[in-house]
Amino acid sequence: MKPSKEVLSQLRVVEIGSSAAASYCARLFADFGAEVWKVEPPAGDPLRSFAPLSPGGQSAWFAFLNFNKSSIVIDPADLETVKRLTMLIEECDILVDGRHIDGANCPPIDVAAIRKRQPGLICLDVNWFGQDGPYAEFAASDLIVRALAGLIKLVGPIEGPPLHAPDFQTGILAGLWGFIAAASAVIARMQTGTGRSYSLSSFEACISLSEYQLFEAFQRGEVMCRIGINRFWPNFPASIYETKMGWLGVTTITPAQWRAFCDMLGLPQLRDDPALVLGADRLKYVEEIERLIIPRLRRRTAQQWFAEGLKHKIPIVPVPDISALLQDQEKIERGAIVPIWLGKERALTAGSMQRLTLTPPRRGGKVPYPGERQSSTNRTPKPTNGASMFRDSGCAAEQPLLGTRVIDFSMGWAGPLCTRTLADLGADVIKIEAIQYPDWWRGVDRRPDYVNRQMHEKTLRFCMMNRNKRGITLDLTRPEGLALAKRLIEGTDIVVDNYSVDVLPRLGLGYEVLRRLNPRLVVMSMSAFGKNSVLRDCRAYGSTLEQASGLPSVVGTVNGPPVMSHVAFGDAIGGLNGCAALLVALIHARETGQGQFIDLAQVECMMPLAAPWIIIQSLCGAPARYGNRHPQFVPHGCFRCAGNDSWIAIAATDDGMWQRLASVIGRPDWAADPSLELADCRRTMEETIESAIEAWTCTLDADQAMLLLQAASIAAGVVRLPVDLLNDPQLRSRSFFQHVERAFIGGHPQSSIPIREAVRPHSIRRAAPTLGEHNGEILAGLLGLCDSEIAELEGKGIIGTQMLSDVELRQGRRSQEASMI
């Protein structure tokens, strides 16, 4: 298909306040052609001074968040410019408001009054913790939010301290959620003419990454703990190892992958040990297993092992540093790495990862100077819309995607999170599995005992990712199953899969086939590396994506190994980017009647988390690694508290906060010392300061220390385990966890999405489907099949409600082969 115009060029976006999440949200709109006005104070957005800095003194972080925007400076003391800002907001489509994170000298704006005059205005308020609750007024930073959200404690050496990645993850994650909220509101407004007002909690956005480990621990009743750098419960090995040359990311999930890995290394004693079949079992023998595999991995280079892994169908991948990432010609050609201009400096950074083929994103751009478009803000006012800004409090009010239908061929985490988000926002998502090959998050154990006890219906991780969906089973390898899938697709809006790139085409459901069935259809392939990648045949999980993204090379200490931040980071990030891409394509389809194909490479979705280092590497060579310290804030890190493995994260994000911190820990002399007033001066005695802080925190419970520090407006947060979130006071006060009843497992908690239109979160309307639960409802209700036709399909095994064991699968294959003779 020939690329079309920039799909969001009809939208005007105004961004106020100083917030990484708000900036990233607004930049995603700019990527697809929206006119984005960034409002700054006379001194510029404080993020302009945020490290790391280019040789010309430009913030790499600010540059990544803000290219392709226009800048206008508003002086709060100038009444005329305040009026001008009000008019600018009245004339826009979307207001992205980051003032609750940092007002940055932004003048007070009566947004409610503006919405009354312009009921079509879409408003997104971005904050750290939400507009209410015990944390609502907490001082915070990227580190503090991730610590409280359970994203730090399980990373690092066993003895501690927990090892966290540098800043920027919270801004990227919350910015994605903000874009999803605002884009879904655009779709709803196309039907109603009415805007929406959303609130986004960055803290709750981060739980998208920790909810998997949270619910696994909840269901199994196990207390997770750090088990070492690049080791994560419940799978092993899912790690990074040194080879003869370079580092290698290894992930083995299924029993077949473990056996193949052992065969590749020549370790039949591990392959044949019945105690090592599953990853959780292997975790009990980590030291013994690594004593055997590490010396063997050092016999070949990472590239040689990668080639062997392809032959054995094992998810292993070389772990690049940022320099290698910049030399990856494929990523440059795909637009995963793009040029940007920071004044006179030309750099490279991560591009937009929403790879729409008909309406592609811009490839790079220019970072605005403060106020450089000051004289261009006079615009023709948008006509007011007569629709009421108030909506009923019923179901439709919280479902902007009501009336959208999605066919979901995805499995695991990434694809199901993408489609779950659409379902949470009101889309009718129909999940298609097969009794022969159900979603692998139901369990990879195919032994008869597991299947006969219906354990595949009792995994909370599956229930977590597939709520609010309907589910059917279809054997797509049989003509009857394929024909039914095509009939469903004819009346749908979106099709999603996260298989390897050739699976659906091989089944007869390639994009060209689907396009002929339904020209309005948006189809997204969420493969690991992209449709035409040289790595397209590489098996991958979320851990593989993180290993291949370049991010581990900037985490950890200067001489340490590349460090993973999560057991499967790439899944959640890929899922949210996929959802964002679908919403952009859906806006275009609703406007033009044209569907399109989205080639989402999940590994590329991880690259924005390393974007500032990509910029610095492209300009002046290898960026620094800081461990738990920070290039700008001193002190900054995790400090031990009273109790077993108890920690608190603390960040002095400005010089006034440092003085208050020094006073609280009993060092008023430091608070009064002018030689320590600036962070660069404190860095010369950073270790001494850290020791004094830990001497104070060691005497206190972590929650007690947090409350004492927050009472003095010092950014601090308990370093929590994911499962601790179930009792977090902020989340409880905001009813974040909802109680859901489901067959086979009964009552259980589910996390809400982090965007709200009212006081309470979006409701969870239905539990995850049991296998084939809605076969009759969908086949009869949507396709008009009668009872006898449905019974015949079940008799042939084309549909069903019972998973087949490996024994039954083998018997079924033999029966099919016999019938063909």
Image (tube, rainbow, N blue to C red):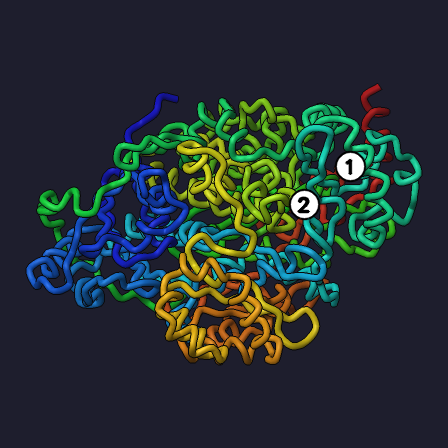
How dense is the environment of label 1, judged by Cα within 10 Å: few (below 14), some, or many (20 and up)?
some
Q: Which residue is mark 1?
A: 257
Residue 461: x and y, percent? 66, 56
The front one of 429 and 57 is 57
Residue 385: x and y, percent? 17, 55
| Whether label 2 touches label 1, CB < 8 Å | no
Q: Nearer the viewer, mark 2 or mark 1?
A: 1
Q: Which image quarter: residue 582?
A: top left
Q: Which residue is mark 2?
A: 439
User: Where's the N terminus, which quadrant?
Assistant: top left
Give the mark nearest the N terminus, 2 or 1.
1
The amino acid type, in three-letter code, at marker 2 is: Asp
Residue 321: x and y, percent? 56, 35
Instruction: Please tell me which residue is depicted at 10% across the width and 57% down the height of the picture.
Output: 81
- Secondary structure under tag 2 reads loop
Asked if residue 546 lies left or right of residue 425, the reply is right
Q: Is residue 106 above or below residue 608?
A: below
Q: Is residue 128 above or below residue 561?
A: below
The amino acid type, in three-letter code, at marker 1 is: Gln
Asked if residue 731 lies left or right of residue 366, the reply is right
- View extreme (top): residue: 821
Instruction: Please tell me which residue is depicted at 15% across the width and 63% down the height of the picture.
Output: 76
Asked if residue 160 lies left or right of residue 267, the reply is left
Instruction: Please tell me which residue is depicted at 51% across the width and 71% down the height of the picture.
Output: 731
Asked if residue 659 lies left or right of residue 571, the reply is left
Task: State whether residue 550 appears in this view.
Answer: yes
Distance of label 2 from label 1 (alpha carbons)? 17 Å
